[in-house]
Amino acid sequence: GTLLLRRLPARSVAMADGALPREPGASDTPDLGQADTIDAGFVLDKLRTRHAHDAIYTRCGSVLIAVNPYKRMGLFSEAVLAQYKNAHSLPAEPPHTFEIASAAHRAMIHNGRSQAIIVSGESGAGKTESARHMMLYLRYVSNTSPELETRLYGSDPITEGFGCAKTVRNDNSSRMGKFTALNFDPSARIQGASLNTYLLEKTRVTQCGPGERSYHVFYQMLAGVTAPAERAALGLKSDASEYAYLRPSASGPSVSSAADGASAAEARGEAAAEWAETEAKLAAIGLGARLAAAVRRTLAAVLTLGQVWFTDPERRGSLCSPPSSPTSGASGVPPDDAAAELTASAHAGCASLPAAELALLASLLR
């Protein structure tokens, strides 16, 4: 069978053993489907009351409503995982993402048919976290092998780095949709998984709105690549604001400033740690040193391409002339040929860029 997780393009009272109590705070209406009325005012009032008591999950029939608490919750411990795995009646348990995952898992086993879970909501609603928690439960109940566990868990930092960005509403907003498929054998053990992304917001690479940023991975690389020789080879600059693609909008905050008042040094340290984790996860899923180096070169080439200037954007083949030092040295592709390759692709070639960078950009556009 196959269980599909689809995410569309967002203080808990604990018992002594760490499991959730039967009545988590505001438990007057844990299932809106059993209420006499479900008009908008009633639903919003109940959600507000439950959220105030840290009951962030509410049922509405087979649908689970999750309200982002914007803080860490003690709802996902191993004791809570065991509580839903061993539950005789899921409706008798408090509403939870583990309940949804458990219901789908049990239906797949009992009915012998594939199941699907759809996670939807606006930006910042908690879609990514909810999907992650359901994956956590499914890995827990299926006794995933350590190797497969590493591969499944390892995809999160990668998809977040390359597919998430800071927006005015969410510091870690997914700018894409994800379709995850888990494949089970007849004994309900996970045998493999696949992840497909779609509707990636490609325009964010070249332009961000006021107060927003590009994809995390660019800032991670700028902070995480520290070896002087490698930084020189990639042509990395010291600050994100030196790149046109990462430069903050005139009406937005500096991209080098950190959220919640943290210092720029702390933000850079956090980005460097995330880069190290991203590289470690790329290795864990089987990306070798050669391909990992190609990823770094490609990211650097994208940022370098953003430094190209158009002297006449309306004319095909227009060359650029930014105020920078002239080209020096030799490369596998002569600078003039590289510039011709760029302009042949209706982009502006910059003959004053270093020859090695220009050659790399040309090869990417071929």
Image (tube, rainbow, N blue to C red):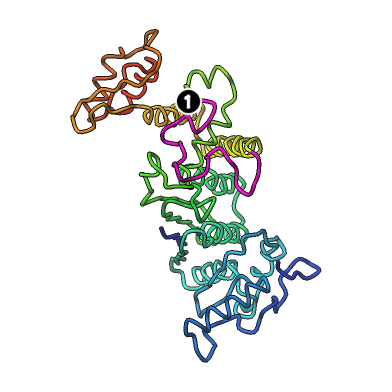
Side of 147 relative to 163 (left or right): right
Side of 282 relative to 26 (left or right): left
Given residues 132 and 335, the one toward you in this image is 335
Q: Quadrant of the N terminus?
A: bottom left
The amino acid marked with disc number 1 is Arg
| Residue 149 located within the stretch drawn in magenta | no
How far across and down, in percent of the image, does residue 207 sit? 38, 42
Which residue is at 70% across, 62% downward?
74
Given residues 253 and 259, the one toward you in this image is 253
Side of 291 relative to 361 (left or right): right
| Residue 240 located within the stretch drawn in magenta | yes
Which residue lies most toward the top here? 329
How far across and down, in percent of the image, does residue 18 sit? 76, 66
Residue 266: which quarter of the image?
top right
Mark 1 burial class by Cα count in 10 Å: few <14, some 14-19, many 20+: few
Residue that label 1 marks: 290
How far across and down, in percent of the image, does residue 191 sit? 51, 52
Which residue lies most toward the right here? 16
Q: Is residue 84 above or below residue 357?
A: below
Which residue lies most toward the front here? 251
Q: Quadrant of the C terminus?
A: top left
Residue 7: which quarter of the image?
bottom left
The main secondary structure of the magenta stretch is loop
Residue 340: which quarter of the image?
top left
What is the span of residues highlighted in magenta in the rendered image? 237-263
